[in-house]
Amino acid sequence: MTQVVDVVVIGGGQAGLAAGYHLRRLGLDFVILDAQPSPGGAWQYTWDSLHLFSPAAYSSLPGRLMPPQPGETYPGAAHVVSYLSDYEQRYELPVVRPVRVEAVHRDGEFLRVETTADTWRARTVISATGTWWRPFVPAALGRTEFKGTQLHTVEYRRPADFAGRRVVVVGGGNSGAQIAADLAYETDLTWVTLREPRYLADDIDGRALFDHATARRRALDEGRTDTGGVASLGDIVAVPPVREARDAGLLKAQPMFDRITATGVEWADGTSAEADAIIWCTGFRPALAHLAPLGLRGPRGHIATQGTQVLAEPRLHLLGYGDWTGPASATLIGVGRPARDAARAISGLLQGE
Ligand SMILES: Cc1cc2nc3c(=O)[nH]c(=O)nc-3n(C[C@H](O)[C@H](O)[C@H](O)COP(=O)(O)OP(=O)(O)OC[C@H]3O[C@@H](n4cnc5c(N)ncnc54)[C@H](O)[C@@H]3O)c2cc1C
């Protein structure tokens, strides 16, 4: 069946919901198509001990503050899932799930959105599919020779799954540091990072990062010099579990190994570490395969945008993938503003402005 609508939002995680909030306020006719069977986007699938790097009030979508989680300064992932579930009900957001968008095509005055269910003809599209669904593992010499288990951040759940085993964690970002800290007490851990871990100061959490992103956005809006993204401050937010493991001397990073063998990893100087498992905490890429028929991809898979609007296809907006679609747009608190901008731009386009 083919349905016609003004706006299709692809993805019902926080970015898609923030878009829905603003589209609803502007009175637009829209639908949100989400591939997951239940609300919460990627937050449903993170490891058990994951906590936000900001307090609840600093992790809120437009219109409704995230309530604090009793007993926790930094809410856990399950709390975020219930907040997002509540959010979509409260604002009666028209989320249809599970529906996976397989392809978006140009179709005259419409964009044709082909899905695992119906086909939608949309005047405009907001793509908000996140990055969790495209884990990235770098090429590594000998990777296929390894006889143990290899997994990515997206598959890691809890230290008990590795109790007493020899584990190599690869990656010096937040996921790597948090998973290494999680495993530090129950496993024989080797933590490997490309460069010496760069911790943010202990008193810097998501609040300060958001303030930094806000100042940057203001500078960009006013045509002043770019102060740089939050990456210029460091790579790792010293959330309490990371701080505790680091201060206990359990987070000693080794430089990146040179090759993987059948039984572990090896450095060029001949030293080695035996391993039962290698966990790749090596990041993600934007999940944009559904946009391939539009032929928009540039270097590193990014699509050129002005704010959220795609330069080569102005009926399409991208939301939440990272700084390239707006400072802090891939965070709970940061996605509100680009979502509002996208909804306003779409409203203008539909009214022929
Ligand atoms: C480990 C980790 C910790 C983080 N910690 C924080 C934090 O503390 N604070 C913070 O603000 N941010 C944090 N983030 C960043 C960010 O807030 C999350 O990544 C968040 O999940 C991004 O939301 P999203 O809506 O963009 O994407 P997602 O949550 O991934 O939602 C996208 C939705 O789109 C669906 N989808 C994907 N492809 C399709 C398709 N083709 N068709 C239909 N639906 C599709 C997905 O199934 C999903 O439901 C963290 C990220 C990670 C990875």
Image: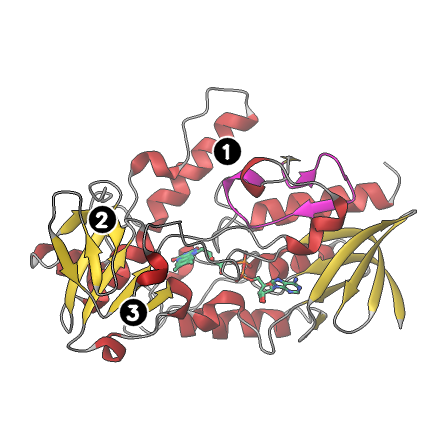
Q: Which residues are magenta?
A: 307-326
Q: Which mark's residue is nearer the viewer, 2 or 3? A: 3
Please determine whether, in this image, residue 218 is positioned above or below residue 198. Answer: above
Residue name at image x 26 percent, y 50 percent:
259
Q: Which image quadrant is residue 117 in?
A: bottom right
Q: Which image quadrant is residue 2 in?
A: bottom right
Quarter of the image with the N terminus in it: bottom right
Which residue in the structure is indicated by mark 2?
Answer: 257
Left or right of residue 217, residue 295 in this image: right
Which residue in the structure is indicated by mark 1?
Answer: 217
Asked if the residue under mark 1 is in contact with the one under mark 3, i.e. CB atoms within 8 Å, the reply is: no
Asked if the residue under mark 2 is in contact with the one under mark 1, i.e. CB atoms within 8 Å, the reply is: no
Amino acid of disc 2:
Phe
Give neighbour class at mark 2: few <14, some 14-19, many 20+ (Cα, 10 Å).
Answer: many
Between 221 and 45, the one lying in front of the other is 45
Q: Earlier in the sequence, mark 3 or mark 1?
A: 3
Residue 321 covered by magenta stretch: yes
Disc 3 CB within 8 Å of nearest ligand 1 atom: no
Please determine whether, in this image, residue 215 is positioned above or below residue 46. Answer: above
Which residue in the structure is indicated by mark 3?
Answer: 147
Amino acid of disc 1:
Arg
Residue 55 at x, y = what percent?
35, 59
Would residue 332 be visible to someone looking at this image? Answer: yes
Q: Main secondary structure of the magenta part?
A: loop
Amino acid of disc 3:
Lys
Residue 338 at x, y = what percent?
60, 45
Q: Which mark's residue is nearer the viewer, 3 or 1? A: 3
